[in-house]
Image (tube, rainbow, N blue to C red):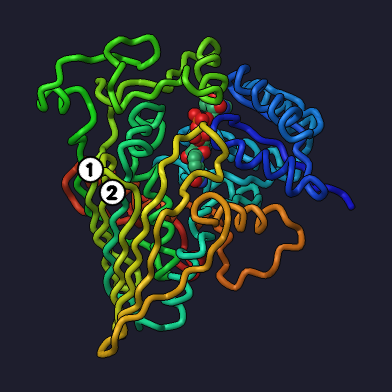
């Protein structure tokens, strides 16, 4: 049987989730033949890891400027894009223009102009783009969809959703490239794309109007100064002031962070361990959003990035009852250890409260793997040629990718202007394609 051929661009922390699966579980049906990055050291780390850790065959390495050359020489079936968010559109569009289908990490992109460019390229080239929304595949998130689709709570009218990031994972976004809003779209896009996609998926609708407020209220130098902090540093590595700061990350203490980032600084100057209490942070750590959906439902959503624990609370109320989900996640640092440690669940509960009847707890299926067991299921859906039919249709298209980021993109616009924002003023997708 001919193997499906893949190439990958962006060989940082998240890339391993993809190349490990190709090199191990799916090695008999899939073939990763080339990898590409702007950073030579990270390329070499990825190549070595594939060969030495997974016993995989050699893969060819390409510099980012040779992306087109890589496609010309390898002619893959799919290009996997795992670069930083701001650059996704560039590689997605170029790959499609050269005739290739693409799998992209979330978020599909970071603003409405780049989103429009991607949608235009898909229409023009007829190529396929799949966005990897792994959260949909976690058993508890899938079960919430099943509960709502079965009509258990009737027609959904109201959603209350809070996502809580802790002082480890949440803080990490303020040390890395994400802290510059141009790179990530802020947490409203980079992180909340998962959550807004889940809501679209759960209630089978899409956003039409967004109002948001947000700000940097805890991280950043000014906030620390207000709290009386007087010792500052720009990065942890080599800093006396960083010693004893619970928000500092010591890359030298971790073999993986050292090889992936510290040793790679010489190539591109990217500093992964910046102080969360430094200047030049342009993303928010505290966000509140109101969203109107096409089906008439309204959501209140909040995201906080400096909480003592990590998890979520969701309450969805319909014409026949209410469902509530509460999760607490374990601590994880991106780039350190296997990605299947990311999003591990410490505790989880779904309770259904039918109108006029006692509430009952819904047992949640147990699955192994990252993001609450969703990661392996999604990988199978993508890489297994004989994957079973998915009645929940969890494979996310470019339309799903676009409609999830549009909530965050419009929230960013609303935060900047103080005004509510109509989603369809900034995206042009014919209603029939939204298919809801
Ligand atoms: N689905 C999930 O749960 C999940 C989890 C983590 C990260 N991600 C996504 O994965 C992607 C990568 O994140 P990460 O945590 O691995 O970041 P990272 O910083 O560890 O890696 C990013 C990689 O992109 C490379 N890169 C940067 N600019 C480039 C360019 N112009 N051309 C080519 N390569 C370039 C960097 O050198 C680096 O190797 C992001 O889009 C992120 O949103 C998704």
As rendered, which of 125 and 186 lies closer to the eye?
A: 186
In the picture as drawn, the residue positioned furthest to the bottom comes out as 356
Vertical order, 78 against 313 (above or below) = above
Q: Residues within 10 Å of mark 2 (few under 14, many from 20)?
A: many
* 424 over 333 or under it: above or below: below
Label 1 residue SS? strand
Tell me, for residue 62, which label it has, or none.
Answer: none
Provide residue 32's location: percent of width, then percent of height: 75, 38
Up-down relation of residue 59 to residue 421 (above or below): above
Mark closer to the chain start, 2 or 1: 1
Point 36% across, 26% down: residue: 175
Residue 90, percent across and down?
A: 55, 34
Determine which quarter of the picture holds residue 282: top left
> Residue at horizontal 27%, vertical 87%?
355
Q: How many marks?
A: 2
Kindly identify the residue that appears in the image at 27 percent across and 71 percent down: 158
Give left or right: position of 54 versus 215: right
User: For this view, does 129 lie left or right of residue 178?
Assistant: right
388, above or below 280, in the image: below
Mark 2, secondary structure of its residue: strand
Q: Is residue 18 visible?
A: yes
Q: Which residue is mark 2?
A: 303
For disc 1, the neighbor class at 10 Å (few under 14, some 14 to 19, many from 20) is some
Camera-side residue of 351 and 314? 351
Q: Nearer the viewer, residue 404 or 137?
A: 137
Residue 108 at x, y percent in the picture: 49, 45
Contact (CB < 8 A) between labels 2 and 1? yes
- Asked if residue 87 shows in the view, the reply is no
User: What residue is shown with label 1?
Assistant: 286
Res 154 → quadrant: bottom left
């Amino acid at each position: 049987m001919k193997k499906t051929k893949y190439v990958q661009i962006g060989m940082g922390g998240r890339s391993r989730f993809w190349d490990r699966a190709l090199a191990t579980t799916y090695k008999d049906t899939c073939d990763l033949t080339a990898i590409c990055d702007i950073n030579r050291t990270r390329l070499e780390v990825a190549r070595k890891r594939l060969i030495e850790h997974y016993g995989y065959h050699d893969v060819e390495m390409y510099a980012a400027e040779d992306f087109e050359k890589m496609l010309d020489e390898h002619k893959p079936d799919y290009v996997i894009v795992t670069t930083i968010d701001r650059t996704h559109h560039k590689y997605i569009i170029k790959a499609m223009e050269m005739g290739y289908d693409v799998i992209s990490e979330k978020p599909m992109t970071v603003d409405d102009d780049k989103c429009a460019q991607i949608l235009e390229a898909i229409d023009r080239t007829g190529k396929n783009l799949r966005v990897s929304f792994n959260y949909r595949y976690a058993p508890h998130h899938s079960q919430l969809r099943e509960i709502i689709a079965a009509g258990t709570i009737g027609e959904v009218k109201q959603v209350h959703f809070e996502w809580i990031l802790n002082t480890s994972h949440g803080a990490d976004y303020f040390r890395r490239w994400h802290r510059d809003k141009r790179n990530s779209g802020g947490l409203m896009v980079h992180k909340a794309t998962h959550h807004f996609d889940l809501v679209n998926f759960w209630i089978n609708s899409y956003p039409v109007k967004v109002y948001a407020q947000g700000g940097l209220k805890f991280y950043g130098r000014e906030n620390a100064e207000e709290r009386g902090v007087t010792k500052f540093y720009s990065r942890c590595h080599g800093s006396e002031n960083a010693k004893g700061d619970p928000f500092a990350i010591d890359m030298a203490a971790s073999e993986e962070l050292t090889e992936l980032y510290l040793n790679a600084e010489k190539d591109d100057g990217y500093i992964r361990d910046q102080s969360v209490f430094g200047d030049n942070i342009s993303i928010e750590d505290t966000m509140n959003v109101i969203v109107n959906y096409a089906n008439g439902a309204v959501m209140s959503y909040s995201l906080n990035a400096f909480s003592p624990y990590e998890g979520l609370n969701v309450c969805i109320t319909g014409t026949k009852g209410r469902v509530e989900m509460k999760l607490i996640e374990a601590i994880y640092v991106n780039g350190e250890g296997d990605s299947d440690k990311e999003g591990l669940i410490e505790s989880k509960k779904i309770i259904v409260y039918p109108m006029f009847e006692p509430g009952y707890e819904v047992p949640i299926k147990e699955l192994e793997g990252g993001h609450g067991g969703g990661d392996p299921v999604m990988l199978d859906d993508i890489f297994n040629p004989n994957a079973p039919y998915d009645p929940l249709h969890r494979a996310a298209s470019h339309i799903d990718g676009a409609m999830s980021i549009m909530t965050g993109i419009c929230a960013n616009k609303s935060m900047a202007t103080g005004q509510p924002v109509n989603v369809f003023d900034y995206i042009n997708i014919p209603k029939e394609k939204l298919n809801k």
